[in-house]
Amino acid sequence: DGLLYVWIDTCCIDKWNLRERFKAVNSIFQRYKNLTRGYVFLSDVSTCTATGVPRRTD
């Protein structure tokens, strides 16, 4: 892709703790709001279905 720099990050958010979740999501937004291109790996999403919509694997 011709990129000079790559940032790799992981996020673990306690979704049951609303205060922590709010702070974490806001922090993530602030960190990535100016990115030009983003790549995401979602371990619980399999390949696309025939319609092109990802499906969740359990």
Image: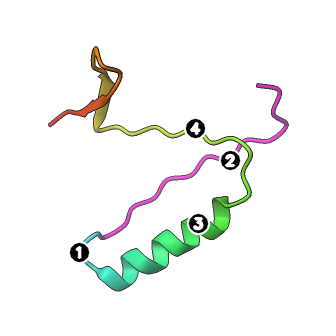
Q: Is residue 2 magenta?
A: yes
**Amino acid bearing label 2:** Trp
Contact check, label 3 and label 1, Cβ < 8 Å? no
**Which residue does the numbered mark 4 point to in the structure image?**
39
**Amino acid bearing label 1:** Trp
Q: Residue at x 81, y 33 (%)?
A: 3
Q: Is residue 32 magenta?
A: no
Nearer the observer: mark 2 or 4; the answer is 4
**Which residue does the numbered mark 1 point to in the structure image?**
16
As helix, strand or loop, the secondary structure at mark 2 comes to: loop
Contact check, label 4 and label 1, Cβ < 8 Å? no
Per the rendering, the mark at residue 7 is: 2
Upstream in sequence: badge 4 or badge 3 = 3
Upstream in sequence: badge 3 or badge 1 = 1
| Location of residue 28 by image quarter | bottom right
Work out how far the residue at label 2 is from the one at label 1, CA to CA, in angstroms.
Answer: 28 Å
Per the rendering, the mark at residue 29 is: 3
Q: Residue at x 53, y 74 (%)?
A: 26
Upstream in sequence: badge 2 or badge 4 = 2
